[in-house]
Image (tube, rainbow, N blue to C red):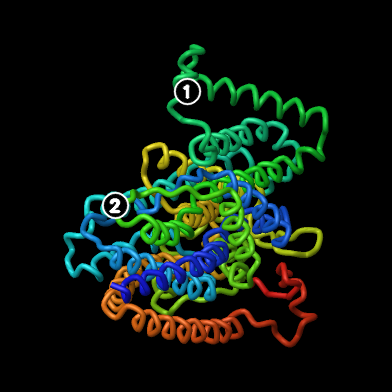
Amino acid sequence: MDIGISFIQIAVALSLIFMILACIEVGSNDAANLVNAVFGARVLSRKRAVFIAGIFVVLGATFASPVMDTIRREIFDIHMMSDVYLVSIFLSSYLVNTLLLYAYSAYGIPVSTTATLVFSIAGGAYGVTGTLESIQWQKLQSIITAIFISIFFSSFASFLIQKFFRKFISHGSQDPKKIAVHGPWISSLIIMGLLWYMLIKGMNLINPDDFASWCREIGLGEFGFMLVLWLALSAFIGFSLFILGEKACKYLFHVTCLLGVACMSFAFGQNDLANCASPGVASLLVYLKGVESGSSFQIPMWGLFACGFLIFLGMRTKRAQRVTRAEVNTASQHSKVKLYAPRWCLVLGKFISQNMASPSKKQSKKLKSLTSKRNDRGKKIHYDTLRASVILSVSASVIAFASSLGLPISTTYVSFASVISTGWADKVFAKGSSELKVGRSIWVISCWFIAAILAALITALVAMIISKWMTWGISLILLINYVLRRFFKNASDEHEKLYHQKKKKIKQLKEEEFEDDQGEDIYDD
């Protein structure tokens, strides 16, 4: 009995330590995706974009619901678990997930913490019990289905909406005349999507059902209320553009980009905090109150603030910058980019780009001028501000819609799908490094499946070792974790030098570089 108590104390202490590390790793990968659109459009430098997004992540986390779901989405049957089994599962999920996130971020690959956590916990449950009956397969299936549907819907909606908006505002959303005519109603639709997202996903104090009831009480209904609000907002924006003139037209979609980053970041802090904290909180709950104590635990506000601040610190790491750079380049409107994809992805990418992304002669002329776009400082503009706004608003709307149905989805996967689909609508995969861009997209999506499989299998093995060998098992896994972390750091640094290293002839490449938030010059093509 003493050995068991000693083991649980050690496991809980380590879980709380790894909770800190998990917050940082989530910031370096998941949260890094929040700034991709606004940075790719050169609305802000990455340093400023991260700072603004970080503020709203911290605010969202601080004012998140203090009552946290510790047994994530009922992935396993808690009644089949002992206290030793539970702390083994939660510690194992941290050990595996932090390493996976570290490795993926080091190579610039976005991955979902939600998905890896779910599969880790499922694998851990099997590892400690040795039976598949401990896993709630129906719940797991619903999560997987929701993720696939959300990715498909985000891709489909982003493609159609981007195509539709491009009929009114072509590749050059800085044209004052076009923006004066079409900007008000387009920007209003974008803002409406973001407001709906904040209502459903971001603001836990507002109940969507209560909002729907209120809309019916005033005689409009939800659709009628949103229609009236859209018309009023369009009129206000149109009047503002008329009064303020061309300068306001130039920055209209800059404003929608910044609003999108603020909304996405606030909601991310509100809802995705549980991905970082729930295993650690659950372990502490098991230690303090036992297995049957319940599945929720109240966290003080200072604890929520601390977790949000740690996520913000993770967003400032070099690994986060690699994730941002790679995703921005993958669907960049520029012809030449620097990316990595294995050979089989390049072969498949070449086939797809040649057969599905070939532009017409008219589109080729547009693409030729599009690929030379740079800002006043000579930095590449990877997206225009209209496309960046569509990426943020569609991602937000899809996430909000899924949340209203109670479906768990991944912010990372939805956002990446929107980036790629808007790029496909704009024909950015039609020339230049098209096979590399498509190949990279295939590689990233393949890595999502690999991450889920690895999370389940490795966590099952780790949880089994820890539950059987206890303290000795923890020591062994910590040693392996450290060795692998050092290996991935060294290997990813070599990978960085090989595919993104600054060349010797700086003057010839000066126009191709951009500064990261640490002041280093890193080339993006």
Name the spot of residue 502 as percent of width and height, x first: 69, 82
Q: Which mark is residue 222?
A: 1
Name the spot of residue 137 as percent of width and height, x first: 22, 55
Nearer the observer, disc 2 or disc 1? 2
Q: Quadrant of the N terminus?
A: bottom left
Q: Residue at x 82, y 40 (%)?
A: 247
Label whose residue precedes the other's in the sequence (2 or 1): 1
The secondary structure type at the circle numbered 2 is helix
Q: Kindly tell me whether residue 439 is visible in this rendering.
A: no
Determine crowd level at label 1: few under 14, some 14-19, many 20+ residues with C-alpha closer than 10 A: some
Q: Residue at x 54, y 75 (%)?
A: 106
Residue 461, above or below 389: below
Instruction: Tell me which corner region of the image, top left, top right, bottom left or bottom right, holds residue 284.
Output: bottom left
Determine crowd level at label 2: few under 14, some 14-19, many 20+ residues with C-alpha closer than 10 A: few
Residue 255 horizontal side relative to residue 137, left or right? right
Name the spot of residue 82 as percent of width and height, x first: 25, 63
Instruction: Tell me which corner region of the image, top left, top right, bottom left or bottom right, holds residue 407.
Output: top left
Amino acid under disc 1? Glu
Residue 154, above or below 511: above
Q: Which mark is residue 5?
A: none
Closer to the camera in the image, 186 or 320: 320
Closer to the camera in the image, 253 or 101: 101
Q: Which mark is residue 292?
A: 2
Closer to the camera in the image, 455 or 75: 75
Instruction: Tell me which corner region of the image, top left, top right, bottom left or bottom right, holds residue 136.
Output: bottom left
Name the spot of residue 466 as percent of width and height, x first: 32, 76
Task: Tell whether label 1 touches label 2 (CB within 8 Å).
Answer: no
Q: Quadrant of the C terminus?
A: bottom right
- The residue furthest front is 2
Residue 205 horizontal side relative to residue 155, left or right? right
Residue 266 horizontal side relative to residue 89, left or right? right
Q: Kindly tell me whether residue 305 is visible in this rendering.
A: yes
